[in-house]
Amino acid sequence: MRILVTGGAGFIGSHLIDRLMNAGHEVVCLDNFYTGHKRNIVHWLGNPNFELIRHDITEPIRLEVDQIYHLACPASPVHYQYNPVKTVKTNVIGTMNMLGLAKRVKARFLLASTSEVYGDPEIHPQSEDYRGSVNPIGIRSCYDEGKRVAETLTFDYHRQNGVDIRVVRIFNTYGTRMLENDGRVVSNFIVQALRGQPLTVYGDGSQTRSFCYVSDLVEGFIRMMNNPDHTGPVNLGNPGEYTILELAQAVQSQVGSGVDIDYKPLPQDDPRRRRPDITRAKLWLGWEPTVPLQEGLQKTIEDFRQRIEAAG
Ligand code: NAD
Ligand code: UDP
């Protein structure tokens, strides 16, 4: 098949492209390199099955493809809050452009949505029928509400125009190729520990998150895209739930650099708890994560160690 991956030069997108290329598909990677990087896909440049297009999805584009994995959107609060109006445009205009493309060429369209659509959840763990508790005017809204509209658009293109859609809601995912300055918690802690700097815990560190290793997530993406029956939404994430302080301690002990913890103010609207209910993913896709936190952290630490050493 010919498959389009928007945001394909980013963290998750580039891992997805590796899987699709290794399965023998033709892949078109579309990215504006806001948080993506050529080094993530450089190993495919020159391969006749691979095409890289520098393009901003807020502008329309014409391509012939069979499937579209739509991931283009900054995912780290630091990056999506840097230019919030652009984040809204990417989620709304960008998603509309990609759905328009799917409609025109009759491609199956998978939206990479997020657990952020649940906001600061009042129910725990979060299942797909929970409608969320989102602040429409806060500093996270450009992303949370942007993704909620992206989901709305996706379902309206399905109902109104018959576009064949899939929606996945991704919970915190980590792994190799995250940016050193990504700003999300796993990469921050690992980079800080490797540099011998204190780990910045926001608030008292009692807030929780559930961390999924990227290879598990990509497996879920591919299963959801290729399942014949279900549009979604479906939660994809690891149900193992940790406080941020527990994560800091895990990184401290695995890096073994003896660094301290530096407590910083909790950002506005930071969700208190988050854990996916993955009953639906198990039932529909036979999917559940297989990589435990310790193992995923080890791989991620090794990747950052090599990059930091290479940079001197
Ligand atoms: P990332 O920042 O590494 O990747 C996003 C990619 O999109 C980058 O390559 C970036 O350059 C590109 N991009 C951004 N705006 C664009 C635009 N206007 N036009 C073209 N390209 C654009 O982030 P990621 O962690 O790989 O996330 C990928 C997707 O998964 C995002 O849609 C994100 O919202 C979603 N997601 C990720 C997580 C997570 O924990 N990693 C959690 C929930 C949802
Ligand atoms: N966090 C932290 N230190 C950091 C970065 C993040 O304590 O250096 C916290 C953040 O306040 C949040 C959690 O870790 O409670 C996860 O943050 P991240 O930005 O990774 O993802 P999100 O909040 O979008 O789930």
Image (tube, helix red, strand yellow):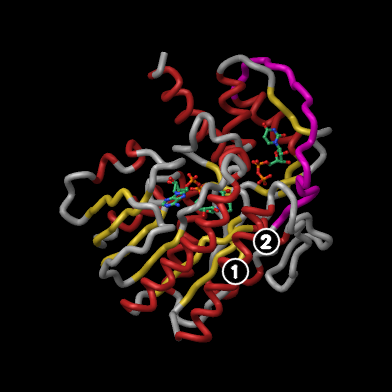
Residue 145 x %, y %: 66, 60
User: Is tag 1's residue or tag 2's residue first in the polypeptide sequence?
Assistant: 2
Label disc, if present, on residue 51 of the rendered structure: none
Q: Is residue 300 above or below residue 270?
A: above
For image coordinates 38% across by 38% down, the residue present is 37
Dominant SS of magenta comes to: loop
For image coordinates 75% across by 22% down, the residue present is 261
Task: Indicate the amino acid at tag 1.
Answer: Val
From the viewer's perspective, is the residue at label 1 or at label 2 nearer?
Answer: 2
Q: Mark 2 highlights which residue?
A: 117
Is residue 283 rendered to the left or right of residue 27? right
- Quadrant containing ligand 2 reads top right
Residue 115 x %, y %: 65, 58
User: Marks 1 and 2, Cα distance to the nearest angstrom?
Assistant: 12 Å
Indicate the quadrant containing the N terminus: top left, top right, bottom left or bottom right.
bottom left
Q: Which residues are magenta?
A: 255-275
Q: Camera-side residue: 154 or 227?
A: 154
Q: Choose top left, top right, bottom left or bottom right for residue 28.
A: bottom left
Q: Choose top left, top right, bottom left or bottom right for residue 182.
A: top right
Is residue 181 rendered to the left or right of residue 263? left
Q: Mark 1 highlights which residue?
A: 234
Residue 256 x %, y %: 62, 19
For image coordinates 50% across by 56% down, the residue present is 90
**Residue 261 falls inside the magenta stretch:** yes
For image coordinates 63% across by 53% down, the residue present is 142
Q: Is residue 245 above or below residue 100?
A: above
Instruction: Verify CB contact (< 8 Å) between mark 1 and mark 2.
Output: no
Indicate the quadrant containing the C terminus: top left, top right, bottom left or bottom right.
top left
**Which element carries disc 2, helix, strand or loop?**
helix
